[in-house]
Amino acid sequence: MLVATPIGNLGDLSPRAVEALATAELICCEDTRRTGRLLLAAGIDGPALRRVDAHTETEAAADVVARVLTGATVAVVTDAGTPGVSDPGARLVRAVLDAGGEVTTVPGPVAAVAAVVASGLDTSRFTVDGFLPRKGPERAARLAELAVERRTVALYEAPDRVAATLADLAAACGDEREAVVARELTKLHEEHRRGSLAALAAGAAADPPRGEVVIVVGGAPAAGAGGDDDVRIALRAARDRGLGPGRAAAEVAAALGRSRRDVYALALADGDEPGADEADGGDPDGDDPDGTADASERTATDADATSDPHAGGTR
Ligand code: SAM
């Protein structure tokens, strides 16, 4: 049973969570001392605690599965929030299900969801993207994806990296993209800094946020609304991922609802070499006169041919 625990405010431990933890035969947790303190505060005494963190989850799975198959209830908690959300849990769930066991949950706090719903940004479609890769091509690729992501995105980040990540987000998504830095949610010093990515980056550099932080980034402009500046930003991000002008134009056109030919023309006007197009398969001057008819099909093909930074990942 996956049991959500507070992200800072003990009052958010639900009565169902207390009951589940009090009656479990074993509680798997990331840090036995931390969870021990939670149990003490909730007046729970009895269940055995076993440390299961990101490094030991796979190795612990066999024992957890064996217990579940004998009918025992094993509770899984993490240091804060919901197990499996940028936290251990998913591998235990998979192992129990694969062995024919049952998995249930006591839902509760998720920092990313709390940040999104209070952000004032569009909540009709959002994604929890966890932590960005720290550096290298993986980070560049993820930032490039975010540049054209239409949904609101919630990112976890360590406080000392918030300013740098906001600056990288501004470079990838554009200075003016709306965002919120949600800090210390549910705690005494809860704060929501709202503004453009550039303004938030400058603010975080001058006054680094302390405590725990979620960054919420508004989605890229909707189809048809992408002006030339949005196209240029998305093209730059696609170029950073190593796409040539043809593929970049197809992808950006599909994402922003623009004509592929217009986007390709902008790419060339901004200095891309048309010759590179042959290598990446783009064909903006092909049979499709306005370049929009097969944009989604081409993008799907391109996506298959492009390395997927999420493939096999643990987000
Ligand atoms: N499983 C957790 C959840 O359900 O939200 C997330 C775990 S992840 C390892 C920890 C990150 O969540 C922190 O680095 C921070 O970005 C975010 N976080 C956790 N508690 C928070 C809080 N009270 N306020 C803001 N962000 C928080």
Image (cartoon, grey):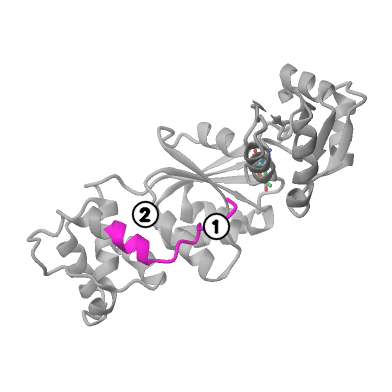
Give me the disc on residue 312.
Answer: 1
**Which residue is farthest right?**
46
Where residue 47 sits: x, y (%)? 89, 28
Q: Looking at the figure, which quarter contains the N terminus?
A: top right
Q: Is residue 227 visible?
A: no
Q: Nearer the viewer, mark 2 or mark 1?
A: 1
Quadrant of residue 111 in the image? top right
* Residue ID at (53%, 56%): 166
Give me the disc on residue 205.
Answer: none
* Residue ID at (84%, 32%): 26
**What residue is shown with label 2?**
148
300, 262: nearer the viewer: 300
Above or below: residue 118 compared with residue 44: below
Quadrant of residue 6 in the image? top right
Q: Amino acid at mark 2?
A: Val
306, 240: nearer the viewer: 306
5, 104: nearer the viewer: 104
Within-10-Å neighbours for mark 2: few <14, some 14–19, many 20+ = many
Where residue 216 sits: x, y (%)? 51, 44
* Residue ID at (36%, 71%): 239
Q: Is residue 139 left or right of residue 267?
A: right
Instruction: Indicate yes or no whether the magenta region holds residue 310.
Output: yes
* Residue ID at (59%, 58%): 163
Above or below: residue 43 compared with residue 281: above
Q: Is residue 265 left or right of residue 68?
A: left
Above or below: residue 250 compared with residue 63: below
Q: Is residue 25 visible?
A: yes
222, 129: nearer the viewer: 129
Q: Amino acid at mark 1?
A: Gly
Q: SS for tag 2?
A: helix
**Magenta residues, start to end:** 299-315
Instruction: Indicate yes or no whether the magenta region holds residue 129.
Output: no
